[in-house]
Image (cartoon, rainbow, N blue to C red):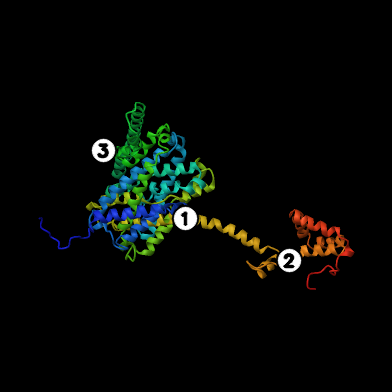
Amino acid sequence: MDEVTNNSWIHMNLEPSATVPLLLGTFAVGFGLVSMVVKEWLFLSDTLVALLFGIAFGPAGLGAINPAEWIDVPSFTLELARLIIAVQVMTAGITLPKRYLVNEFKSLLMLLGPVMTWMWFTSAVVLMLVFRLGLVEALLIASCVAPTDPVLANSIVKGKFAESKVPQHVRNIISAESGANDGLGYPYLYLALYLLRFSKGEAFARWFVVVIVWEVALSVVLGALIGWAARVLLQYARKNGWIDHDSFFSFAVSLTLLTLGIVSLIGSDDILACFIAGNALTWDDWFREETTESHFQDVLDTLFNYTFFIYLGTIIPWSSLAGGTGLLTTSRLLSCSVLIILFRRLPATLAVARMTPSLETFREAVFAGWFGPIGVGAIFYAMVAQKELEDSVFDGLLAKECLLPIVYTLVVSSVIVHGITIPLYHIVSAVPNATVAVSRFLSRTPSQSSSNLLFPFGSRAPPSPIRHSRVVAIRSGHAKSQLGILSSSCPAASESTLLEEGSSGNARQSDDSAVRSRRPEDLPNYGSFSQPGN
């Protein structure tokens, strides 16, 4: 018999190998059971719910899980964010229509050029004013939050609200921009890093050769070649029956991993290459149409999103965000978040709306300008910057102290604000209807209003004075003169009431005919035309 080291026969396993699957499974199953209610009725984003779940069970909440105890958080976060962004930008590239990058080149040029540059500079100006940073250090941090997030953008362009309220061409341009500009964050980030490390001449020379040519331009070429070759080989294999059903529908994920590996191996921009490869794969719409009915990619995206935002909720450094001292006070962090969310994207999008063919109306420009969320991409670039700032050359920079707290605050703020925007839209849009209903009630005639007040629901209302007066007039033998008085005193009510009574049914018509057929002298005398009780 083996030696027993524990006296108890059964013991609890509280290792991460048990607690992590437990929490992820609990959220996936629990949220899945009410996902329709949360997303399609309440219009809340699943990323917001996942983030709140992670915060509740992380070190700041119940303390059920603390990844910092068993992993290297910066390295693990960097690689997890890289994988999730790569899958999302590949999906964004695949879901775009035929030859989209060429057909909508002008719209993409405006959003990826002037708008993205405005987001970079505006965020830097806010950081300079709020945290008193230098220009280059502010540009460094601002480069992390300049790209829009493809994960959060994906939750905006899908679902009941998007399909019923947002035109397809607006959803396409948001997906295309978020997929492309996540890979275009490197030029902004490394320009600031090189300016902090080298002289201006050497910094710009390195930036052009290393970043613009080697990372950006080469990644576009490699992505296009990989996507084109994958499409040709896939079509050939499908035509000859070499590929089975499951492998065909999981091909996009496999291509994502292949592209990441090839481009990362030579040190180029793997995120941008994945987006280009995805769009090249479906350049002729063949792959997109073939996989329209498959939901494998959506299921995988959903699980990745749940995992990352729950994980993000457990690693947020709340000690640096709440009650901080020096530069990182709570008031400054909140002020920075409000200013950046308001002015980072919307003004620039409205300014170039007339030169952006995909934004046909002012409302579409407002929607595209507002929904430029900050999410996984910002975390990814923050981790890249943090890794670069570990070099001793950057010792003493305020950016090393401020980078992660500011980026985490902006990400949490963006997830919350953009996650509740659509529910607030529905609440606000319901106000005019309620106002119309109240105004209609208040504009009713005094007799109708008092009748409702004196005889509430459930009580029997008094007989209509108009109908009673009509019967009295007929019975008194002076129908013509009395009806004339009725029409002059209540012109609108008399006509509508008589028309209504004339179409009330055969029984009422027979009763009125019987009353009219009797002679006046055969009827009892009810007195003059007056209200009952007088």
Residue 72 in percent (x, y) is at 23, 53
Q: Residues within 10 Å of mark 1 (few under 14, many from 20)?
A: some
> Which residue does the numbered mark 2 point to in the structure image?
463
Q: Please state if 361 lies on the left or on the right of 233 as rendered.
A: right
Q: Which mark is residue 42?
A: 1
Q: Helix, strand, or loop for circle 1?
A: loop
Give the percent coordinates (x, y) of residue 188: 35, 46
Does residue 357 lie above or below 528 as drawn? above
Q: How far is mark 1 from mark 2, CA to CA?
A: 45 Å
* Amino acid type, residue under disc 2 in the picture: Pro
| Residue at image location 66% in from the left, 64% down from the top | 442
| Residue type indicated by callout 3 | Ile
Q: Are marks 1 and 3 in contact (CB under 8 Å)?
A: no
Q: Earlier in the sequence, mark 1 or mark 2?
A: 1
| Alpha carbon distance from label 1 to label 3 | 46 Å
Is residue 135 at least partly visible in the picture? no
State how far apart marks 2 and 3 are (Cα).
90 Å
